[in-house]
Image (cartoon, grey):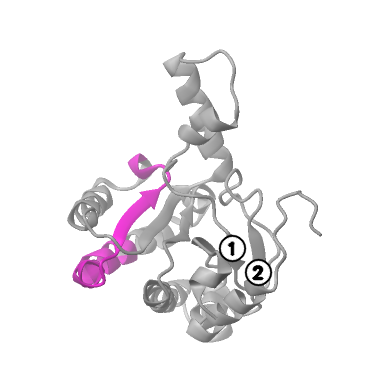
Amino acid sequence: MTVNSLNLNHIAIIMDGNGRWAKDKGMDRIFGHKEGAKSAKKVIEACSDLNISYLTLYAFSTENWNRPQSEVDSLMSLLSLMLKNEIKELERNNIVFNVVGRVEDLPKSVQNIISDVIDRTKHNTGLVLSLALSYGGRQEIIDAVNKIIVSKKSEIINEEIVKNNLYCPEIPDPDLIIRTAGEHRLSNFLLWQSAYAELFVSKKNWPDFKKKDLMEALKDFENRDRTFGKLTD
């Protein structure tokens, strides 16, 4: 199986189950998030090796701000640490770093680190890695509509106009969305972009999701018949 033969350009992943994984082991939730970060690193490396063009990871939703402040603070600290530690690895592997979401909602210190990593990887030509941070699909559509209203460039709104005002209009829609921990929902993730995405659900919690599980998802995708609403012979 080759990625080119699959016509697979963009994988998006809802990394679910870190807290449950930790609870099952009698550990604090942040321990699950730390182990989940390790799984993310392995999947990023695998997608880079497979010559996937785009990978988007749902790291922190707009709803996650409602979690206990101690957990939010720990997640922001973990994010900062991971970005600082992995910047050289991103550069070495020719990976472009990107963020989709309301970056302005993040702590200023985190914003500064994100800006630095984006700047240092912007000339790379390999995998485009996007972290969805302070991201919500409904909020993205609302923000897009408000941008259109403010711009006053058109009285008629069509799909192209909406798409061009989303957070990252240059990134193609995902072909495959993977969700872990056995849940069968999008949880406000890429609602506009996922209209024709194929869905794959893994029963494994995210810290247990490895390269072989990614390959299982790709194998499943290989067997899908993507008609995009059209008839086939």
In front of the other: 75 or 7: 7
**SS under mark 1:** strand
Question: Which quadrant is the N terminus positioned in?
Answer: bottom right
Along the line of sight, the residue nearer the viewer: 26 or 231:
231
Amino acid type at image mark 1: Leu
Report the magenta stretch's main SS. Answer: helix
Dot 2 and dot 1 residues touching (CB under 8 Å): yes
The residue at the point 34 percent across, 40 percent down is 104
Residue drawn at x 42%, y 72% as measured from the top left = 47
Up the image or down, 10 lies above or below 141; here it is below
Q: Where is residue 105 shown, x and y percent of the image?
A: 37, 42
Instruction: Point out which mark residue 200 bears.
Output: 2
* Magenta span of residues: 78-104
Count of all numbered marks drawn on residues in the image: 2
Q: Earlier in the sequence, mark 2 or mark 1?
A: 1
Mark 2–mark 1 Cα distance, whole angstroms, equals 7 Å
Query: Disc number at residue 25?
Result: none
For label 1, the residue is: 176
The residue depicted at 49 percent of the width and 79 percent of the height is 207
Direction front: furthest residue: 233
Q: Who's the residue at 48% across and 22% down the image?
A: 148
Q: Position of residue 107 (x, y in %)?
A: 30, 48
Disc 2 secondary structure class: strand
Residue 151 magenta-highlighted:
no
Whether residue 193 is situated above or below residue 78 in the rendered picture: above
Which quadrant would the C terminus be assigned to in this image? bottom right
Few, some or many C-alpha atoms within 10 Å of disc 2 (few <14, some 14-19, many ≥20)?
Answer: some
